[in-house]
Amino acid sequence: MSSSPERNDRKRRRERGFSPALNAGRGPARARADKDGSVWLWGWHAVAAALENPAREAPLRLLATPERARELQGRHLGAEMLEILPPAQIARELPPFAAHQGVALKALPLEPVVLEVMAEPAVGVILMLDQLTDPQNVGAIFRSAAAFGARGVVLQDRHAPALAGALAKAAAGAIEILPHARVTNLSRALEELADLGWRAVGLDAVAAEPLAAVLDQRPVVLVMGSEGDGLRRLVAEHCDALGRIPMPGDFESLNVSAAAAIALYEASRNHADPAGR
């Protein structure tokens, strides 16, 4: 009896080490704080940027493979406290499926800035995230926000992932250079930002106007909704305008990090100097 294509495919996947039972639920490693409040960061760019950030306290632990240790020592990054370990031993210190790239750092989390400090003077673009919980999406958004020169990112105290782990890896060092503020209530934060001279524009897939039509040269808070539900009603009501990203292709929506990158690009065009910087 000949094997079916589906059976052959399952056999090939087992031979490569894939098991549906063992791999169910595989996803980005979630960063959780230890009892002392410390968190793990992993990935070369995330760890190197953290070691170069003067605003961070000294790391609690720094693990590296022999090859990565040579790179860190060559850049004088944390060389005095290196623990040189094989890749498998580093992996055992981290959450499951953490793609550590041969280096990991245990440190206290970054301190948020006060919202008023981020917002004054009212110039440029601030990004606000309404209950975005996927660490890789939030990390990618930090990376785009840094690339397009945003002033900072506003997160909630709750319903927002820690700036560590898979988020820090996806951000590729952006969390070390881009300020973030944490607030209890986004609606009240938008009221406070309005008093400081900021205009809020929310991203909404069913908004009447395209995003480019509702943006102008005034300082703007771009408000992004959650991956599944979008902007919450009260947050949307506190926006001065809602805009959508036109999509002529026959597709329903964009990933939230891709949408944020497009929104940041559109907003940055209005705030670029005459030389295009």
Image (cartoon, rainbow, N blue to C red):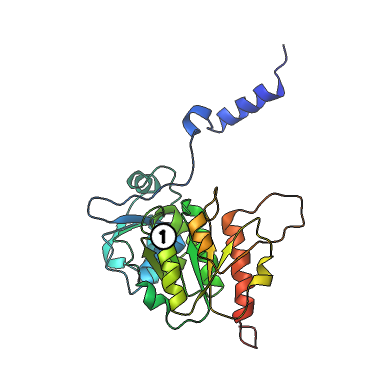
Query: Which of 246/189 is in front?
Result: 189
Q: At 36% from the left edge and 60% from the top edge, which residue is drawn?
A: 184
Any part of residue 50 in sight = yes
Q: How crowded is mark 1: few (under 14 residues within 10 Å), some or many (20 or more)?
A: some
The answer to which image quadrant residue 193 occupies is: bottom left
The type of residue carrying mark 1 is Arg
Any part of residue 71 in sight = no
Instruction: Give x and y (percent) for residue 182.
Output: 37, 64
Q: At 28% from the left edge and 56% from the top edge, which residue is drawn?
A: 38
Outermost residue, top side: 1
User: Disc 1 marks which residue?
Assistant: 68
SS type, badge 1: helix
In the image, residue 111 sits, relative to residue 33, either above or below, namely: below
Outermost residue, left side: 36
Task: Name the quarter where the C terminus is drawn.
Answer: bottom right
Instruction: Give x and y (percent) for residue 103.
Output: 39, 56
Instruction: Give x and y (percent) for residue 243.
Output: 63, 64
Q: Is residue 165 left or right of residue 265?
A: left
Q: Is residue 229 left or right of residue 75?
A: right
